[in-house]
Amino acid sequence: MHRYWQTGLSTVVALTLLAMPLPVDAKEREGRRGHIEIEAKKQTMRQQTAGSSALVIIQLSGTVQEEWKEEIEDLDVKLGDYLPDFAFVAKLARSSDQKKLERLSFVKSVKPFSPVSKISPALRSAFGKEQATEVATIRFDDDSRNSRMSSEAGQRTEDSSHEMARMTREKKSGQALEEFVLSEDIVALVPIPQNTLRNDVASTILHVDELSSSGYRGRGQIIGVADTGLDTGDEASLHPDLQGQVGRLHTLGRPGDARDLNGHGTHITGSILGSGAASEGKRKGMAPEAKLVFHAIENEEEGLVTDVERILSEAYEDGARIHSDSWGDDDEGEYSYTSYLFDKFLWEHPDMIALVAAGNVGDNGYQTIGSPATAKNVIAVGATENERPRFGSQSDDADDVWRFSSRGLTEDGRIKPDLVAPGTSILSVRSSLAPGKNFDQMYDEHYAYMTGTSMSTAIMAGGVAQVREFLNEQGEKTPSAALIKAILLSSADELNEDMRLQGYGRANLENSIQTNYWDEKKGLRTKEKASFAIEVSDDSKPLAITLAWTDYPASLAAKRALVNDLNLTVTTPKGKKLNGNDFFQAPFDDEVDNLNNVEQIWIKEPEKGEYKVVVQGYNIPKGPQPYAIATTGKWAEEPEQPPAKTPKEVTYRGTVDTEKNYREYTIRLMRDGDVKLSAEWAEKADVNLFLYNRKKELIAASTSKANPEKLEVENLKSGLYKIRVELKKGEKARFLLSLLYPGRW
């Protein structure tokens, strides 16, 4: 195994896990997995007792079962944000509901959701002051007036629109914040990040071959970019390398004005898909056959106008499935409001991949990665050096991570950046309106040099277009972002750097299209498993197996960002069991990752033979959870779609009579499907069948005079249902009830 996390990091993670209180029963069931009963952000503020809240935290006794959620909701309790571990913010309709909840065997406790748990640490200094602070308010209930979500654009908007907390942005004084946080509808108050560009040093030539010789050029791909502007802002007079490349141009910073007075947006766009027309094809971007959807977001007075929901939604509607964002806030690893917005959109649109620059303050040490690169579902990109010694020490070793590239871990301990790519001394397109002082060095009237994680992110966005083009040709018409992430991380080059600097390594696009992969879009629920077999015949090359998934957005009241927790385990040909992301010194099978939505097994010198791979749904409160696997090994057996689930057959014997004229039975459909019911009896009587949903609404009935009485219902949604066998006529009927419905695997 490999992956340098350094002694200091090992100590931090070990102490974090040891500090987590483990109930005895949890230890026995879950081994050495860390457990926190409730991890909500708690800050000190002036004690206030007014405004009793209907919000509570329901702490469950273990991993979240779908049946538990349904039983809670049957009590007319509304579940909201998930909080690690195994808890939900919830709203009670009546105070008496608390006792009903506490009587449920799987509910450990029900406690008030305190106002002090709603406030971001960054807002503490604003309390009590008259000066207004711009904040995002996260509400428990939907606020359709403030939502811009498009149900047509997303693949998961059907339930996310009512399950996810609504958001508003407003300015409030310190006193107003204290009063506002007492509202029973408020889940969290967080500051609005102050986003800036990710290129504060500048200098070298974009050398595409250092990353890839794949031959793919982004044909058929549309890439979204949000940045300062695009050269002249007029498609008719754009830089020659960008003419014909623009599919749609939006203006947010200065309405109707897409000019690039800074130079940053034009430069990174050239790195992504510049045609090279001004250099006779010598200085092309990574994906010159891709098309562009651009949002000009710079405003000289306000800075960058980063309306994430609008930017991503409009880009998606314009066909973009790749988005490049070379801006952010240096907020020291925080999972910010902007991070949440990225995760929210990407969960709702799982075929959209976003690449975000890590930041340029790595010289300040670890945990310097900024948001929104801290979002779980983006690919956070750090910078390596180019090998251009004439530009000095920051471009003299292609295997070094640039010293200013921002470092992980995130505030909650997740691995970021995800990977690194060349970012120093990049030569790309120059805006004709940007002053020379904004560049490190001019090349000629058409090109200039710049450096930063902005540049490495742009290069990776073009690289992703190449990979996605390859996947399209292989029949993957809508590859998930999780699949592309898993492929890139499995194929990355190990730089022998601390993972807090390099993530999972430096991208290698040529290797990426040689991986074997599986894109599972149906997903897993709690306790469900999927198995794969991988064959290694060449032990001279490292073996990488990467599991990645697009996770449900974290509550901003939670201390840890991970919501749906999958586990990756691999058993070697000699029977050794390895856990995903256990990169510490031997033994490598003693820790299970409950922080990241990427897990990897990396073996420098693998043994030959067959490796057994298991993906398990450990805790899936917001499922089912789709996922993807990519490996540098070969499939021992080509993965197949899971076989159709065998319908579950159940029979019940019962009696209905004049004293108790009906019997009810509860069934759970584990997936969508058909239900067939049949009741037969020997007595002279008439029996009817009724089917109700979990809200006690009648779905179907059979009231004929036939014996047996039969009822068939097609295309029912998964969930709980009740069956009623009712005596319509006669004194008694001893019946045999037969059921056929979609059960477990």
Image (spheres, rainbow, N blue to C red):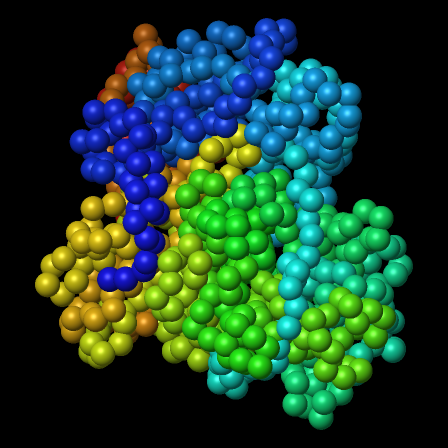
Residue 326, relative to residue 718: is it above or below?
below
| Depth order, front residue of 434/104 | 434
| Residue at x 41% of width, y 65% of height | 505
| Residue at x 64% of width, y 64% of height | 201
Left or right side of 370 for 168: right
Residue 549 visible in image: no
Residue 209, relative to residue 328: is it above or below?
below
| Residue at x 57% of width, y 24% of height | 118
Residue 207, picture quadrant: bottom right
Left or right side of 122 for 276: right
| Residue at x 57% of width, y 69% of height | 423
Horizontal and vertical percent for residue 351?
55, 60
Left or right side of 632 for 124: right
Residue 655 visible in image: yes
Which quadrant holds the N terminus?
bottom left
Horizontal and vertical percent for residue 442?
74, 78
Horizontal and vertical percent for residue 64?
36, 33
Horizontal and vertical percent for residue 584?
26, 52
Residue 541, picture quadrant: bottom left
| Depth order, front residue of 701/717 | 717
Question: How many dots with numbers?
Answer: 0
Residue 106, relative to residue 586: is it above or below?
above
Toward the bottom, the furthest residue is 280
